Structure formats: structure tokens, C-alpha cells
Image (spheres, rainbow, N blue to C red):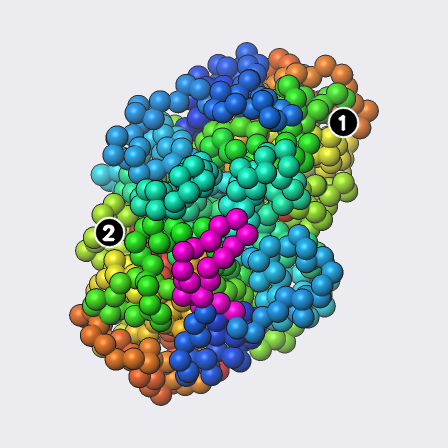
């Protein structure tokens, strides 16, 4: 049977492409500057009436990173995940023999909803008998993950997790548990999401898209989110694997917690208990008390309902003193990718002995200590959270091992 | 670390041959064909005009009107199947810690009918502002487990694994792991997919659909059929189930995952990913290949899948493959996508409980390249102790799950 001997799970490599730039080293500088904001308006089958602000990818050119060959049928999400692999994990994927190659687990809300919607639009505009059959493969939510498995002949695991805003964090939690069960020694896990016409339209119709950028997480009068896109990947390894290949750990995933807030899902209003429980479960698994959390990398995005849920849960579990930051000010709401991106931002801050501030002072929600100006701090434990108005509550604790 | 054993104590099914566990079972025993001329839309523009629709599903029997209004067909199927499974299990929610109850679901397309509705409104009126404001939030596939968790008050971990047509096995496997790890006591797990115009168009354009009926492993097999449905299981810690005197259908003893890493829409003809998953499932279960009594095949009815799957079974089971029955429920159901392996896991639970193997229908002409015992056309009574269910998917995802008759 698969071994369930206790093992620690470490993060030994990371890669990212987002509005913060391409590569982990870019994060620190980007969090010290004004957010990079672009806009979108025109897509192949649809157009918006005006430019929509969004956090896009300032320095990623798929042709440069991946080469021109074979890109024609790859959609934006696939190019994004392959680019992140290529810039962060190419060596580990190609150097290890096939039997020991890391598995892949990706969190995403939609895969490529642009591909799904365009396949449908194409069939409406041009007729069902004229759509490109090769485009159909891109309509399954796990398509980008599968494309990564194919490119690197990674046969050990191909998993996709989809829990909306929490997908990136939940993919890390899924992988943490998978490795704890002893099925594999290493998995590249993370989150992926693209800015698309269809997701923008959905957020717009749902009334949670801000008209101005950047967004104002935890602002008492926030009007909504600014969309972003990106991919963040982490190599998670068992302690045995780290020792065997003499790898250097960046951090340890010390504990995880997942709960569901049925009140929030029902009405958007909650007493915060489910979120609190997710944090406390993660602390218990990490073997620490809530007071030992040095800072919170929150999922706050400017969504007024979700930000209130998150503030309430953090205050209930940790009190009002622990510093709480919100990287989505800089990355935008990267939806299924955001939990993984926030984890990398927290790792960057831990590495640089600081907690990055939002960069603008405004009146924030009561009960929590929002970091507006960057503070210097040596941190041992960072808590990454995601509490969404669809009821998902996820918490992950990373431990600085350096 | 002591491991918790995991048992199946409740089942719920929504399928093209019947909604409800007993309705499904009786129809399957009779070898009912659920692939029929489509009613959901006019298929005259398509090469294929058949599919597996659930025609007897009445949402109002399981859901309040306000819940029907706020969820798509995939969620409706899933909640209905979950309701059946919960009732079947007899789990007393008033005695359970809600934070130790999880939900783990699988899907291929999620809620495609929601996207199809929204895009069609956009084209019909030319105005995206005509799309109802509450429609977009029904689309993300994460709404499927969220709707189950919300309605039944399960507050523990919950997620959806959209690993296409292997998704049900992935979802059941994750819930099994959470119980083994001691993180939860019980879970809803399974899969759900509604009939998808996108999938129907796509499989038609790939020429993967049969023009009439599904004939898995038959020499004259002509393709798969797009179908819809849901399967949900209640699984729980053995000790908890025993304390409350629950009916135990079967024990989950392990599973294995793999990947072809070959092509997006075609299985590896050497069966590499399937062999990996099947071998892992047997190893993780602590049984030997000689102990396998029956395999519930992925068995889509396409030339590539059935040939590759036969090879996989022969490679892993060796000589034992010749005497191990292998059947395809998709001969009756069509391909219910992300629900398929969940429905098949529920069917395997029933087969173990009732010691009967359900048949592969529409089987007439043996294929020299598919030379196993496919239990053609009529069910077979036999001893079933250890049973495996395979599921494969787009992007090369492969999975096998192992169930065993509970013996104490």
C-alpha cells in the first residue's frame, strides 16, 4: 500500500509569470513600485464598448520563451503555463528520468474560458460543421495542465483543481496531501488563469468589476476588483526527496486548512466561523499557535463582500494585531491563479525580510491590521488565505527554513 | 501513522437509463440502451443524431424552486444524486461535526449550458447587458461541490477535480485520501456533467461519435456517444460506519493515477498511462493481480480506446486477463463524461453487493485485437471480491480505483 509515514513537504523551486514580471526575482522590485496596469477591449469574436483595465503580462513573449514552432494551436492559458515551466522548471523536468519526473497539479477556475467561449462562438457564427476540430481539445478545463504533461513527458500525475478564487491555493493543498499519502516524491503545483472576454464579461455582469485601477483591497468603500492573469508554480517535495537529491529548500509547507462557509455561499453574509476554522486547522497541522503567525498574505482584492469575509475570519482567528497584506493590489484578481501567486509573493517578502504594503493609505475595514506601507520584519511563519464569497475558505502556512 | 479504512455507505445516480439507484440497476440488468435520438436540440446539422440524455429527471423532486433558479443542470444532477446518497447512507447530520464532512466532485465541462445560454443571448440580442446578472456565477465548475456543501451543510474541505472523463475516479480518490489522513470522517464524492453542446460539436468534429449505438470492444464499433448524468457516493471511516450500523456496499482499498503524456485527444496506443495507473492501483491496494475478479472498463466504444485498454489489462494482469471479465457500462449509458467513473464506481458497489456483473450490450462480432471476456449482452452471476474500475480522459489522464467486498 502507499506509504503514509510522516513526512515534511518542502518548496524547492518556484516560477512565475504575472503582472509582476517573469521570474521570482522580479517580484520584490514590482511590489516596491506602482502596479502595472494595462487594458483590453477587442477579442476575436467579441468587443467591449470601452477599454477595461487589467493587470496583464508586461514582459512575456511566448515566441521568445517557447519558440515559434507548435504555438499556432496553443491557446493563451497553455502558452502561459508552458512559459512558466520553461523559465522555472525546464531543468528539473528534463533532467530527471521519466519514472522520477515530478507530477503536475494546477489550480484554475476555467482552464481557458477564452477557448471554450470562442469554440462556442465559432460554432454559432460559422456553423457547427465548420469549427476547427483541433480547437476542441482546448475546451476541457484540464487542457493547459495536460499540455504541460505532454511537453515534458510527465506521466506521474496530471491533476487539475477548480475551486474558483481558491483553486491555486487548493492545488497546493491537494498536492500537499497527495505527497503526504506517499504516492509521489515531487509535484509541480500552482495556479493558472488568463484574462479573457468571457471572464471579464461575467465579472462585469455580476457587478464586481471596478471601473478604475488599481483595486483597493480592504477599503471600506471599495467598488470591486481589477482582473489580472498569471501562472505561479512551486516544486513541492517530500523531505526524503530533498535529502536524496541534496536540494535546497526555500520553505516548508507546514500546515493547511480547508472549510466551506455555507452562509457566505447562501447570502454573502457570514459570522466568519468557517474561515476561522480553516486558519485554526492549518495552525494545528503546523503545530503552532495562531500567535506565531508573523503576517497574513490575504486574498483580498477589492471585492467588498469577499474582503469583509476575509477580514472577519482573520480577526476571529488571529486578532487585530497581525499584519495583513494584499498582493492583489499589484497582481489584480488572478482568480484561480491568485492563491499560488500570493504564496510566491509571501515567499519573496520572507526572503527579503519585509512585508510589502499596499502603497496607498485609505480607510480600511475594522478589526485587522492592514499593511499600507512596507515594513521590515523577519518572519518565520506566513499564512496565505483565500476566502471567497462562493463559500470556499482555504489557508496555507509556509515556514521559513532559511 | 495509523490509517483509517474507508467504506462506501450511500449511493445516488442520475443516468440516461434511469434516475435512482434501483431504477438504474434494473435497467442495467435488462441491458437497456440509453443512447437515443436527441431531444435537447435539433441535431440535423450533425453527423451524429443520438446521445444519452436523462429524460426522467425532475429537479423539483430534489430541489427547492429557489435553488433550481440559482444553479445549472450539472449542479442539479449532483445535488439530486447527493440527496439520494445521503438518504441511502442514513448518515445523521445532527450527530456529525460539519467541519469533518467533505465534498469532492469531478467534471469534464462543469456547467457548459450556462455559458451556452449566455453566449446565445449575446448573439441573439447583440447586447451583453441582456445576460442576466446572476447567470455568470452559476458557470464556474466550483459551484457544483459548493451547491452540494451549501444545501447539505457539509463544512469540511471541498473541491472539484475537472480532469475530464477520469474526473470521478480522481474525486473519489481524493476524498478517500482525506479520510485516510484523518482530515475528515465522511464525504460526498463523485462526478457530474450535463449534456453539452460544446462537447457534442467537438466530438462530432473529431469523428469520434457513433452514428447510432455504442458497441464497445466489438469489431464493428463506431464510436462513443455524448451523454449526461451524475453519480455520488457517501464514503466514510469504517469505524464510524460500524458504530452507527451502516449498510456497507464495499470498501475502497486504493487507487492509482497516471498520464499518457502523449496527445490531447488520443490515448497512447502502447497504453503507458493506463498501465501505470492500473499497476499503481493494485500496488496501493495491497492486493495481487491474481485477486482481481472483474474490471469495469473505460470502454468508450472508440477504436483507439478499446484496443488500448485491452492491451493495458493484458499487460498488467498477464494470464489472469484471459479469465477476468471486463465490461463497458458505456454500451448502455453512452459517455457521461466527468460523471462516468463515478457512476461506474457506484455500479461496481452494487455489483459487489449483489454478486452480479453487468454486461457489455450491443456486442455481436469479436475483434481479434480485443480478445478478453466482455460479458456480452447478458449479466452474469459470479463471485466478486476485488473489483477495479478504469477511467481515462482527454490530455491522457488515467486512473484506476479498487473496491473490495467488505469482510470485517
Instruction: Tell me the residue that label 2 is attached to.
Output: A268
User: Horizontal placement of A161 versus B135: left or right?
Assistant: right
Q: Secondary structure at mark 2?
A: loop
Q: Main secondary structure of the magenta part?
A: strand
| Residue that extends furthest to the bottom in the rendered view of this protein | A376
* Residue B261 in the figure: left or right of residue A181: right
Q: Residue at label 1? A: B370
Q: Is residue A52 magenta?
A: yes
Residue B170 rendering spot, x and y as whole percentages? 52, 44
Magenta segment boundaries in residue numbering? A39-57
Residue under the image location 58 percent in, 78 percent down: A248
Label 1: element kind: loop
Q: Residues within 10 Å of mark 2 (few under 14, many from 20)?
A: some
Q: Nearer the viewer, residue A221 or B142?
A: A221
Residue at x 52%, y 79% (from the top left corner): A26
Q: Position of residue B101 (x, y in %)?
A: 34, 45
Amino acid at each position: 500500500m502507499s506509504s503514509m509515514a510522516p513526512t515534511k513537504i518542502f518548496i524547492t523551486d518556484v516560477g512565475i509569470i504575472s503582472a509582476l514580471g517573469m521570474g521570482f526575482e522580479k517580484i520584490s522590485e514590482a511590489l516596491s513600485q506602482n502596479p502595472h496596469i494595462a487594458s483590453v477591449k477587442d477579442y476575436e469574436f467579441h468587443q467591449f464598448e470601452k477599454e477595461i483595465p487589467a493587470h496583464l503580462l508586461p514582459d512575456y513573449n511566448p515566441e521568445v520563451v517557447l519558440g515559434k514552432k507548435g504555438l499556432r494551436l496553443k491557446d493563451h492559458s497553455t502558452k502561459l503555463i508552458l512559459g512558466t515551466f520553461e523559465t522555472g522548471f525546464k531543468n528539473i523536468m528534463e533532467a530527471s528520468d521519466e519514472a522520477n519526473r515530478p507530477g503536475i497539479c494546477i489550480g484554475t477556475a476555467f482552464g481557458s474560458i477564452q477557448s471554450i467561449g470562442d469554440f462556442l462562438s465559432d460554432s454559432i457564427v460559422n456553423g457547427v460543421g465548420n469549427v476547427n476540430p483541433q480547437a476542441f481539445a482546448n475546451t476541457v478545463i484540464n487542457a493547459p495542465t495536460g499540455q504541460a504533461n505532454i511537453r515534458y513527458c510527465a506521466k506521474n500525475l496530471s491533476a487539475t483543481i477548480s475551486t474558483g478564487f481558491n483553486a491555486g491555493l487548493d492545488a497546493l493543498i491537494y498536492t500537499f496531501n497527495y505527497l503526504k499519502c506517499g504516492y509521489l516524491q515531487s509535484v509541480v503545483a500552482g495556479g493558472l488563469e488568463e484574462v479573457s472576454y468571457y471572464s471579464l464579461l461575467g465579472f462585469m455582469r455580476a457587478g464586481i468589476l471596478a471601473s478604475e485601477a488599481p483595486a483597493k483591497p480592504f477599503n471600506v468603500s471599495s467598488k470591486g476588483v481589477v482582473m489580472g492573469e498569471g501562472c505561479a508554480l512551486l516544486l513541492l517535495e517530500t523531505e526524503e526527496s530533498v535529502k536524496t537529491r541534496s536540494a535546497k529548500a526555500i520553505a516548508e509547507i507546514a500546515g493547511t486548512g480547508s472549510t466551506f462557509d455555507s452562509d457566505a455561499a447562501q447570502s454573502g453574509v457570514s459570522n466568519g466561523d468557517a474561515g476561522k476554522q480553516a486558519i485554526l486547522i492549518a495552525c494545528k497541522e503546523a503545530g503552532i499557535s495562531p500567535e506565531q503567525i508573523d503576517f497574513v498574505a490575504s486574498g483580498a482584492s477589492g471585492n467588498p463582500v469577499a474582503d469583509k469575509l476575509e477580514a472577519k475570519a482573520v480577526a476571529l482567528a488571529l486578532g487585530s494585531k497581525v499584519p495583513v497584506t494584499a498582493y492583489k493590489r499589484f497582481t489584480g484578481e488572478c482568480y484561480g491563479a491568485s492563491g499560488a501567486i500570493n504564496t510566491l509573493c509571501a515567499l519573496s517578502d520572507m526572503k527579503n525580510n519585509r512585508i510589502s504594503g499596499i502603497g496607498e493609505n485609505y480607510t480600511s475595514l475594522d478589526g485587522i491590521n492592514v499593511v499600507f506601507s512596507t515594513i521590515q520584519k523577519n518572519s518565520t511563519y506566513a499564512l496565505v488565505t483565500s476566502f471567497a464569497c462562493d463559500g470556499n475558505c482555504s489557508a496555507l502556512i509556509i515556514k521559513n527554513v532559511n | 501513522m495509523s490509517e483509517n479504512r474507508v467504506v462506501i455507505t450511500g449511493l445516488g445516480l442520475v443516468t440516461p437509463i434511469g434516475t435512482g439507484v434501483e431504477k438504474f440497476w434494473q435497467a442495467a440488468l435488462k441491458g437497456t440502451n440509453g443512447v437515443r435520438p436527441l431531444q435537447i436540440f435539433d441535431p440535423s446539422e450533425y453527423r451524429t443524431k443520438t446521445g444519452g440524455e436523462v429524460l426522467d429527471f425532475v429537479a423539483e423532486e430534489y430541489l427547492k424552486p429557489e435553488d433550481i433558479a440559482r444553479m445549472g443542470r450539472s449542479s442539479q444532477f449532483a445535488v439530486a444524486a447527493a440527496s439520494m446518497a445521503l438518504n441511502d447512507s442514513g448518515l445523521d447530520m445532527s450527530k456529525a461535526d460539519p467541519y469533518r464532512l467533505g465534498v469532492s466532485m469531478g467534471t469534464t465541462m462543469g456547467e457548459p449550458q450556462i455559458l451556452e445560454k449566455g453566449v446565445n443571448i449575446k448573439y441573439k440580442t447583440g447586447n451583453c447587458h441582456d445576460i442576466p446578472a446572476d447567470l455568470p456565477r452559476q458557470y464556474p465548475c466550483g459551484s457544483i461541490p459548493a451547491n452540494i456543501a451549501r444545501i447539505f451543510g457539509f463544512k469540511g474541505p471541498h473541491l472539484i477535480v475537472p480532469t475530464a472523463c477520469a474526473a470521478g475516479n480522481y474525486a473519489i480518490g481524493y476524498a478517500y485520501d482525506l479520510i485516510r489522513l484523518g482530515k475528515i470522517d465522511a464525504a460526498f464524492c463523485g462526478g457530474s456533467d450535463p449534456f453539452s453542446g460544446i462537447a457534442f460539436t467537438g466530438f462530432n468534429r473529431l469523428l469520434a461519435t457513433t452514428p447510432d449505438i455504442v458497441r464497445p470492444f466489438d469489431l464493428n464499433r463506431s464510436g462513443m456517444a455524448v451523454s449526461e448524468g451524475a453519480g455520488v457516493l457517501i464514503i466514510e471511516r469504517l469505524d464510524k460506519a460500524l458504530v452507527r450500523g451502516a449498510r456497507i456496499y464495499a470498501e475502497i482499498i486504493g487507487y492509482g493515477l497516471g498520464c499518457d503524456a502523449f496527445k490531447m485527444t488520443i490515448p497512447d496506443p502502447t497504453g503507458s498511462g493506463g498501465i501505470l495507473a492500473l499497476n499503481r492501483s493494485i500496488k496501493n491496494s495491497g492486493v495481487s493481480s491474481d485477486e482481481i475478479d472483474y474490471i469495469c472498463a473505460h470502454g468508450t466504444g472508440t477504436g483507439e480506446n478499446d484496443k488500448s485498454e485491452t492491451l493495458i489489462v493484458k499487460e498488467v494482469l498477464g494470464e489472469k486477463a484471459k479469465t477476468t471479465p471486463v465490461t463497458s457500462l458505456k454500451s448502455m449509458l453512452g459517455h457521461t463524461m466527468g460523471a462516468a467513473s463515478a457512476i461506474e464506481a457506484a455500479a461496481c458497489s452494487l455489483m459487489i453487493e449483489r454478486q452480479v456483473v453487468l454486461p457489455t450490450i450491443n456486442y455481436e462480432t469479436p475483434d481479434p485485437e480485443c480478445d478478453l471476456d466482455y460479458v456480452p449482452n447478458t449479466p452474469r452471476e459470479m463471485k466478486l471480491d476485488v473489483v477495479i474500475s478504469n477511467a481515462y480522459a482527454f490530455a491522457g489522464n488515467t486512473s484506476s480505483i479498487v473496491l473490495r467486498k467488505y469482510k470485517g
